[in-house]
Every structure is written in C-alpha cells, then in structure tokens.
Image (cartoon, grey):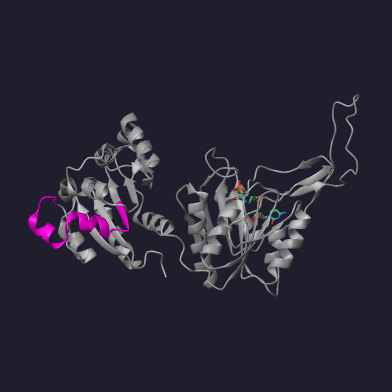
Amino acid sequence: MSPLTNKRILLGISGGIAAYKSADLVRRLKDRGAEVRVVMTAGAQKFVQPLTFQALSSNPVHSDLLDPAAEAAMGHIELAKWAELILIAPASAQVMAKLTCGMADDLLNTLCLASEAPLALAPAMNQAMWRHPATTANAKTLRDRGVHLWGPAAGSQACGDIGPGRMLEPAELVLQAETMFGSSDCLQGKNVVITAGPTREALDPVRYLSNHSSGKMGFALAKAAQRAGAQVTLIAGPVNLATPAHVKRVDVVDAREMRAAAERAADLCDIFISAAAVADFRPAAAAEQKIKKQEDHDESSIALIKNPDIVAGIAARVERRPFTVGFAAETQQVEQYARSKLQRKNLDMIIANDVSRADSGFNSDHNAVTVIDRNGSDTLPPALKTDLARQLIEIIATKAQQ
Ligand code: PMT
C-alpha cells in the first residue's frame, strides 16, 4: 500500500509550460490512492483547460476566490482545512514571490496562507529567473519557513535555454510526496540487517586506517526500515550517532569484527544492506606498542593485507541467502563501476553514489544515488539522506518481493 493511500492532496497549478505535466501528476497521485483537488491560477488556465484536471481528478477545479457558487460548494477555508498536503506544481517565480510576501490576492496563495498543511513547491521557470538573486532569496525564505522545495531539475528548457529550472518529473514528485508521508508498512514482518559507518584498522594502539564515512546513510536506512515495519539489526562501525528507536545496534571496530557480526545476524535475515565503508585493506600486523618515529628515516611503509569482503560473503551463501544490497562509492564512471561490483559480488541490487560531489556522499546530510539491478537503473534526485532512505527502503522492499 502506498503512503499516499487516502491522503488528501491539494494540487496548485500556476502559469507555466510545465502545467501540461501536472495532468500526468494528477493521474499518478490518484493511482497511488490519493484524493486530489486541483486549484488553478489564471495563468495556469492559459496553458491547460480546467476540464482536463476535472476529468482526471474526478473533482471540480477551483480557481476563483470570489466565486459565490464555488464558495457555496466548498469554501476556500474549508478547502484549506481539507488538504493534508498542498503541492504547487509547477510553482512559478511569481507564485514563489507572492508566497514569500504572504499575499492573498488569488485563491491559491490565499489557501496557502489559510492552511496548516505542509506546503511543497515544484519550481519551474527559466534558468535565469531561477538564478536571479530575488528568486534565490525567496527560495531561502520559504525553505527557512519549512516549505519543501522539490527541485528544480537542470537540463534543456522549453525556451531553449539550458540550466536549472525544469519542474521535476511527475514520478519524482510522487516519490517526494510518498517520502513526506512516511514509509508504508512495506517491510512488515521482515528481518533486515544493515551495516553502517567506517571500519578502523589498527596500525598500533593509537593509530588506524579508516575513511570519512559518518554512518548517516546506514543509520537513516535503519530508521526507515524500522518505520516500515522491519526488525532491524544495525551493525555500526565507530560513529557518533544515536541509535534509531527500536533498532538493535551492534558496535564493531574493524572489518573482521563487522564480518563476524554480519554473518551472525544474516542467518536470520530477509534483507541485508551493506552501507558501511569497509576498509579494503588492513595493516598486515598491528604493532602491540606505539610505533616510534625513526629520526633518521624520511620514509616509511606499511604492509597491507586484504580484508574479507563482507557483502560478497553474504551474497555467496547457498543456504539462508538474504536479498543482498550493496553500496558503491565511486568518484568516476559511477554507474559502470557500480554495475561491475553488482556482478562481481553477486548482489541483487547496488546503490551507487557519486562521492566526487562536494555536496553529497561521505559525511554529508545529502546524497545522490542511482539504484542498479540486473534489469536496469533508476537515478533518484539529490535529497537528504533521511528522505532518500525512505525511498530506498520502498524500492528494496518491492524488489525483494519479486
Ligand atoms: O556513512 P556516510 O557518511 O553517510 O556515507 C555513506 C557512504 C558514502 C559511505 C555509503 O552511501 C556508501 O557508499 N557505502 C559504501 C562505500 C564503499 O566502501 O563502497 P565500496 O565500493 O568500497 O564497496 C562496495 C560494497 O561492498 C559496499 O556495499 C561495501 O559495504 C561492501 N564491502 C566493501 C569492502 C569489504 N571488505 N566488504 C564489504 O562488504
């Protein structure tokens, strides 16, 4: 069941060429079980006829603040109270500016003022308008007020320009709405094991080899899986994060400890997700005492040996093999390298993240991922790791059932 089932979504449509995509958006929201009512600005009606949305939503389209007949049916305050989410798609620069100022000069912005429902905008405008300092400032003000900004995406625009300002595709907007309403119970009764964080490979009692993984991605997945109804065991390398509620946590330090904990927990699990950044190598021998600096040596070297590959070991099981998901942190040819890991490690799915991006990946609150399995790939829009985790759990749950 989709998290959108029976949810009351008020879809605001403002004037922009992307308004034609909103017809598909209504259909997709309805397919997920949402009840949809549409409000159109005057500008929107120049692009698409209200009748289209009336037919698709099975509800009359609202457009006039001062129409006595419409008010008699469902007044604007009633409509504002009815909504569990107001989504404006496309949201033009004009709508964003009006919302920033708190204007109430048409039905759509009046509803936004009168409603306590969460407000999400899917900006769509020319790239120069999106980049303009006025729009940038409006976007910041709206975000600071708790308004969700979904997109925009970048690419070629209807006007011929290339850059940021394209409305997210309807499928992506639906995913965002599902994420906002929280996971369904898609993992009810399932046992899920997740590894997270780095491993530390000791050189001596005070030094180690490690990496920049913070554990945020794995912890977000653990929380999302638990909320989706799973019994979750989280095997955590050394990180500084609180344990998500109702999740069983096993702390480990190095790769061999992580493997032992993973093998134990995997015996009972349905889904194994390897989000940890496991050190591929460890020092061949960890010194028992602190290694002393040799004043007469300008160079030094450390002999390394390979660590066990934890996720490949789980995926190689003949008996009690869970649906096995890996992550791939890559800095170049992301999809190609990830796909080769999917095959080499015999995984059911791999989630590739481009860790060359400064704004995502290791130790960031954000990530940008592509989900890859043997049937294809799906790139999710960059998002908070907490939001991505909910989307990934939905995808993993669906694939694990197939
Ligand atoms: O922790 P964060 O700061 O939130 O950052 C998240 C992340 C970037 C660490 C995470 O999203 C991620 O990409 N984790 C995997 C990083 C990685 O080390 O990838 P890899 O390409 O080296 O390994 C591929 C897969 O094999 C991974 O699932 C890894 O967990 C697993 N592996 C790797 C080596 C090894 N010895 N054992 C393993 O199980």
Q: Is residue 56 above or below residue 295?
A: below
User: Residue at position x 88%, y 30% from top?
Assistant: 293
What residue occupies the far left of the structure in this picture?
68
Q: Is residue 400 above or below residue 292?
A: below
User: Residue at position x 27%, y 62% from top?
Assistant: 36
Foreground of the two, 282 or 194? 194
Foreground of the two, 107 or 36? 107
Answer with left or right where residue 137 lies relative to residue 245: left
Q: Is residue 305 magenta?
A: no
Foreground of the two, 64 or 334? 64
Determine which quarter of the picture holds residue 145: top left
Answer with left or right where residue 376 lies relative to residue 124: right
Count of numbered marks: 0
Q: Position of residue 189 (x, y in %)?
A: 56, 73
Q: Position of residue 72 (x, y in %)?
A: 11, 60
Q: Is residue 83 magenta?
A: yes
Residue 292 visible somewhere in the drawing: yes
Residue 23 visible somewhere in the drawing: no
What residue occupies the far bottom of the structure in this picture?
319
Q: Is residue 278 above or below residue 160?
A: below
**Image: magenta residue range:** 64-87
| Quadrant of the drawing holding the N terminus | bottom left
Foreground of the two, 129 or 155? 129
Answer with left or right where residue 66 lies relative to residue 399: left
Q: Position of residue 23 (x, y in %)?
A: 25, 58
